[in-house]
Image (cartoon, helix red, strand yellow):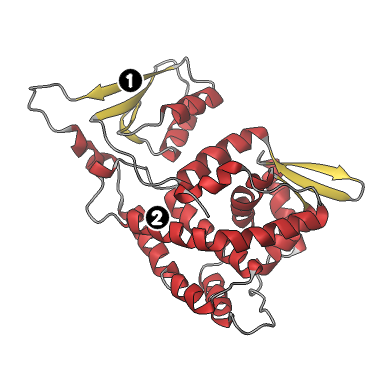
Amino acid sequence: MTVYKLWSMQKNQKINGWIEEFLASDPPRSKSLVMTIFGDAIVPHGGMVWTGSLIELLAPFGVNDRLLRTSVFRLAQEGWLGAQRDGRRSSYAITPDAMRRFSRAFRRIYAPLNVHWNGQWTLVLAADGLDAPARGQLRKELLWEGYSVIAPGIAGHPAGDMEALEALLSRLGLLQKVYVVQASEVPGLRARPLGEMVAEGWDLSEVAAGYGKFVAAFSAVPGLLAEAGDIDPEQAFVLRTLLIHAYRRVQLHDPQLPIELLPESWPGARAYELASQLYRQLSAPAEQHILTALRREDPSAPQPETSFHHRFGGLQ
């Protein structure tokens, strides 16, 4: 990946320097960056983008035409994107199946940390009739959803999202092939508290370290923004994209445990506060750049949908 380009203007050179240093120390893979930009910037505007606009959006990150076309080709092969041609021009859009997964993932990313525990666990019991490939796929998807395998054939979570679980099982064709139950402690029985299953089911050290790294990387940005005053729309877009790209890399590995079952001084809370603060500051100018790039190829590109303004508890 090439070095982030410098603007000719001087007033925000410190922000340019931070971006250059960040990209040099932890350069994002182009394919993963395309996914971030689709989810964060393109989905709110209808989920479709012409290649010329996508090239413009990726250029500040050093992703050239060849890298971009390779990335979107692979994403199309994997079922994330669908391609269309109009004469010599081509466009890419999120496929319907991918849109459902995007929606779920990005609801998690932008949602406040307000999951509380009602004392129950959701358990998914794999029936004996499942073959090995189905069991493997179910395990993989449940782990991605934040569940832990607490015993052979049994996955559990203390704050399972029933809507997400039903969608997951339906997508895998397993809705009628597994058992889903909710379990709570038996009153009066002096067994181990259910809350202690968290320590056995999840090793949160890597997630905590990831949140700590995120906070360390972005903690200087609020000061840089305050010093800069007005920020160039393209700079705001680059910063917002890097912010979400780094945050989602950690957050999507977070099992989303209830607040009551998390360790004290959980770093995810500080990471969310910082991400929320910066996203609110950057969104308005970043949206100017996004809409300009989209409308350069498609004058009818829409304003962001209403749900966009609900991100991180509400944008200005």
Q: Secondary structure at mark 2?
A: helix
Residue that protrudes farthest toward the right in the picture: 87
Vertical placement of residue 93 versus 297, above or below: above
Rendered residue at 63%/46% (across/down): 44
Question: Dot 1: few (<14), some (14–19), or many (≥20) neighbours within 10 Å?
Answer: few
Vertical placement of residue 148 versus 299, above or below: above
Residue 196: which quarter of the image?
top left
Rendered residue at 70%/66% (across/down): 59
The residue that mark 2 highlights is 272
The residue that mark 1 highlights is 181
Residue 11: which quarter of the image?
bottom right
Report if the CB atoms under discs 2 and 1 are less than 8 Å apart: no
How far is the residue under mark 2 from the one under mark 1? 31 Å
Three-letter amino acid code of the residue under disc 1: Val
* Side of 254 where 134 appears, left or right: right
* Side of 288 where 158 appears, left or right: left
Three-letter amino acid code of the residue under disc 2: Tyr
Quick one: 157 or 296, which is closer to the camera?
296
Please tell me whether mark 2 or mark 1 is closer to you in this view: 2
Residue that protrudes farthest toward the bottom in the picture: 10
